Image (tube, rainbow, N blue to C red):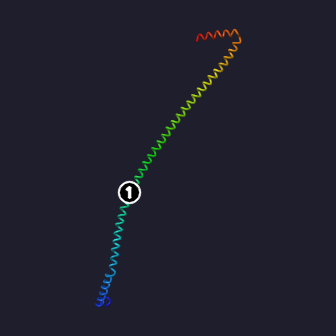
Amino acid sequence: MELVSPGIGLIFWMTIAFGLLLLILGKFVWPPIMRALHDRESAIEMSLHQAEAARREMETLQFNNEKLLKEAKEERDALMRDARKVREKLIEDAREKASLEAERIIESARERIEHDKMAAITDLKNLVANLSVEIAEKLIAQELSDPVKNKQFVEKSLGEIKLN
């Protein structure tokens, strides 16, 4: 039974050894362990604060990014509207220019046609006049070959002149 019930000497020496162990641990081991635990606790607390600050900063950045994205979309839409307006204006200007150019070409063609028509009429009149003169020369030559007809022709011509 001696194994189960310790003796007073054993308890005394165990108490001294345990006290000595506590004294050595308290003097040399516990301060570094406690310091390490406090440092670790401070580091964890600082990391939590940094994580919270980073989370807030990320929320702010996300809000700013959404705001910038919205502004960029609005600016893109405004640019697209302006581009459409410019395109429509250019198309309208081109249509007006083309219309004016077509009118100018048509007017020029009309003037050319009128000029060519007048030239053709003038040429036709000259041709008719030349043919008339040639026919008249031939008729007069034929008519004047006979002296009696010649006298009648002169009298007739004088009568017509007086009537006009």
Q: Quadrant of residue 144?
A: top right
Secondary structure found at label 1: helix
Figure label count:
1
Q: Residue at x 70, y 9 (%)?
A: 147
Q: Residues within 10 Å of mark 1 (few under 14, many from 20)?
A: few
Q: Where 114 falls versus 98 (above or below)?
A: above
Farthest residue to the right: give it: 145
In front of the other: 19 or 45:
45
Residue 84 place in picture, x, y as percent: 46, 45
- The amino acid sitting under disc 1 is Asn
Q: Residue at x 37, y 61 (%)?
A: 57
In front of the other: 15 or 56:
56
Q: Quadrant of residue 118?
A: top right
Q: Quadrant of the C terminus?
A: top right
Q: Quadrant of the N terminus?
A: bottom left
Q: Residue at x 32, y 89 (%)?
A: 3
Q: Is residue 158 left or right of residue 19?
A: right
Q: Is residue 38 left or right of residue 139?
A: left
In front of the other: 134 or 67:
134
Residue 106 place in picture, x, y as percent: 54, 33
Q: Is residue 132 left or right of residue 17?
A: right
Q: Where 102 falls versus 164 (above or below)?
A: below
Q: Which residue is mark 1?
A: 64
Q: Where 160 falls versus 97 (above or below)?
A: above
Residue 128 place in picture, x, y as percent: 63, 21
Residue 163 place in picture, x, y as percent: 59, 10
